[in-house]
Amino acid sequence: MTQSSAESPRVEVHPDRDALATAIAGELLARIADAQTDGGVPHVGLTGGTIAGATHREVARLGPASAVDWSRVVLWWGDERFVASGDDERNATQAHSDFLDALGIPAEHVHEVASTADAPDVEAAAAAYADDLRTHGAGAFEVLMLGVGEDGHVASLFPGYPQLTVDDAIAVAVTDSPKPPPERVSLTFPALARSRSVWLLVSGDGKAEAVAAALAPEGTVEQTPARGVTGTEETLWFLDRAAASRL
């Protein structure tokens, strides 16, 4: 099922998590290949979480037979947990395990947030990530993928938190995340908005209320941060039936 209009995000609903992951992976491979055909080196923003992991494994399965040149893809993250390098809590650790290593993406094209071994504190990690994006970014993500929490958060921008209103920085430190681990680095809304296409990936009935709040005609970003990110060309919600059950 697809819903769309010129004024609203496009919503795709798939039968279950597995079908959703396959659809996202296929669309991502097609978008990257199209951008490369046009001569570009697409920069893609990754996310973490269960549906992201399932999607990444589908990319690993489908990627070798696709038209994508994996030497011409640059990867970033919308947020990261400030923990030790290799910790399973890190989004990057999971992504390496799920697909990055299998596809042989050059290490210099994978821009990770500093771990506790690389930065003295989370504020320094945020500053370093902002510098990295400022120096090596393309000015916009071709595709930015974001998960959505049960509370409606995206990246590590949580309801009611001061990071929601930061408009003069690329990345910010979070020191008291309401879900562990407490220290994280997140791109800000202005940085996330520098994306041609924003994809919000949501699976499970536990997220249904947050999805409904984010897509409701009325509401605030303060209450539901997922309302605050839109792409410059399109915003696409990829949902399974359970996540879409309250729409």
Image (tube, rainbow, N blue to C red):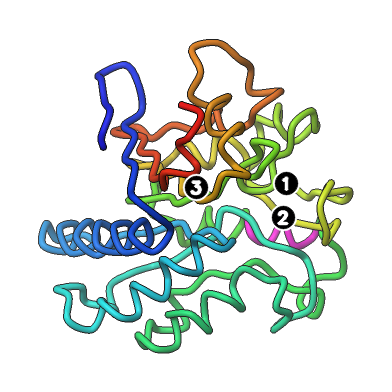
Could you tell me which secondary element the residue under label 2 belongs to?
Answer: strand
Q: Main secondary structure of the magenta part?
A: helix
Mark 1 or 2, nearer chain start: 1
Could you tell me which secondary element the residue under label 1 belongs to?
Answer: strand
The residue indicated by pointer 2 is: 185
Measuring 17% from the left and 75% from the top, which residue is drawn there?
A: 66
Span shown in magenta: 124-129
135 magenta-colored: no
Instruction: Using the image, tell me which numbered label, if any, was put on residue 100.
Output: none
Give the amino acid at mark 1.
Answer: Val
The residue indicated by pointer 1 is: 172
Q: Nearer the viewer, residue 149 or 47?
A: 149
Instruction: State the quadrant of the N terminus.
Output: top left
Do callouts 1 and 2 mark residues in contact (Cβ within 8 Å)? yes
Marks 3/2: CA–CA distance: 21 Å
Give the amino acid at mark 2.
Answer: Val
